[in-house]
Image: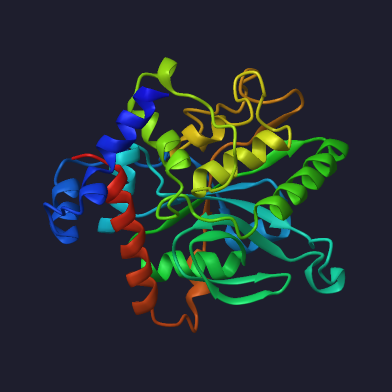
């Protein structure tokens, strides 16, 4: 525990002291000049976005790749091909109108950016929380505001009865986590320390016992663990805090792995969604979004040493 908080104090030294030795723009430049982070698997199969919408199911994992400075900084410091992860959610929450939301494809995500949410009692721009957004709204947001953005999906694979049980558990997770704060910038030093200790050797990395805040990848991991997709022996409840977006690709979660997945379920092969540019028709400007993404990047800088 002491070593974890040593790591957290080290990683947040500029925030705690109030000293900012570099302007954000200089820190982004420094980071992006260090080299090129990994890129998504070039041999991934492809599927048209409009076709995917017909097949989308609760529990599919969306992974986002991009090359602008903010996206690249996140990829560099997580040493992975993706800068964002989110979970597909198809259907209605208990208090929502099933005739309106029963077959709607939305995305459960944790983000610091301002996005247009759409779930019970919440319709409009919100930020810094766990939220549900329409899948088209999210993709439009990322493509409009990013650079060379690619969307990869790993589809949930299981027999129909098991899929229904998993969907019900993810629905419960959504109810339990919606509106909880985004970890970075929330002031929750305990959850921040758990994330910070990923710089320590694995045997010193502890699983968390409370679930007050989330970042994008910890929310996805928590939902998959709680739903019985990820094997609880290798990925116990609380180990979500060590997941980055890269940990959902096939290198870390192979399709055929019997150690990573529970019996009878897995995440399928990485599939690149094509035709996503079509959702950009009538897309609004992105000045406000860019400012919001810069806030996400500035908070990331507080957690990562150079």
Picture coordinates of residue 245, whole percent (x, y): 46, 42
Asked if residue 56 can be seen in this view, the reply is no
Quadrant including the N terminus: top left
Q: Quadrant of residue 119?
A: bottom right
Residue depicted at 70% across the width and 53% down the height: 174
Give coordinates of residue 128: x percent, y percent. Answer: 48, 62
Where residue 255 sits: x, y (%)?
A: 60, 28
User: For the C terminus, which image quadrant?
Assistant: top left
Q: Nearer the viewer, residue 212 or 123?
A: 212
Asked if residue 238 is positioned above or below residue 34 in the image, the reply reads: above
Asked whether residue 90 is in view, the answer is yes
Q: Is residue 176 above or below residue 40?
A: below
Q: Quadrant of residue 259?
A: top right
Using residue 126 as the reference point, say whether residue 266 is left or right of it: right
Give coordinates of residue 87: x percent, y percent. Answer: 61, 50
Compared with 112, 285 (above or below) is below
Q: Is residue 65 left or right of residue 85?
A: left
Against 79, is 88 above or below? below
């Amino acid at each position: 525990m002491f070593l974890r908080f040593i790591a957290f104090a080290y990683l947040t030294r500029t925030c705690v002291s109030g000293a900012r030795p570099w302007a954000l723009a200089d820190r982004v430049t420094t980071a992006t000049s260090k080299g090129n982070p990994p890129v998504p698997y070039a041999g991934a199969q492809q599927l048209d976005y409009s076709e995917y919408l017909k097949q989308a199911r609760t529990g599919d994992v969306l992974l986002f790749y991009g090359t602008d400075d903010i996206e690249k900084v996140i990829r560099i410091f997580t040493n992975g091909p993706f800068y964002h992860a989110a979970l597909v959610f198809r259907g209605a929450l208990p208090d929502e109108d099933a005739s309106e939301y029963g077959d709607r494809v939305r995305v459960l995500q944790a983000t610091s950016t301002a996005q247009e949410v759409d779930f019970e009692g919440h319709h409009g721009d919100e930020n810094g929380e766990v939220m549900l957004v329409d899948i088209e709204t999210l993709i439009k947001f990322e493509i409009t505001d990013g650079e060379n953005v690619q969307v990869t999906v790993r589809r949930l694979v299981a027999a129909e009865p098991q899929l229904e049980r998993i969907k019900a558990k993810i629905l419960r997770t959504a109810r339990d986590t919606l509106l909880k704060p985004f970890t970075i910038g929330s002031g929750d030093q305990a959850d921040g320390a758990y994330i910070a200790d990923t710089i320590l050797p694995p045997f010193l990395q502890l699983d968390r016992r409370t679930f007050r805040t989330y970042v994008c990848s910890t929310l996805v991991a928590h939902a998959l663990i709680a739903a019985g997709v990820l094997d609880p022996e290798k990925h116990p409840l609380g180990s979500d805090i060590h997941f980055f977006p890269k940990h959902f690709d096939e290198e870390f979660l192979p399709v055929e792995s019997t150690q990573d997945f529970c019996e009878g379920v897995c995440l399928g092969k990485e599939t690149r969604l094509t035709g996503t540019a079509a959702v950009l028709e009538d897309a609004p400007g992105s000045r406000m979004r860019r400012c919001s993404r810069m806030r996400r990047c500035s908070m990331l800088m507080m957690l990562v040493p150079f």
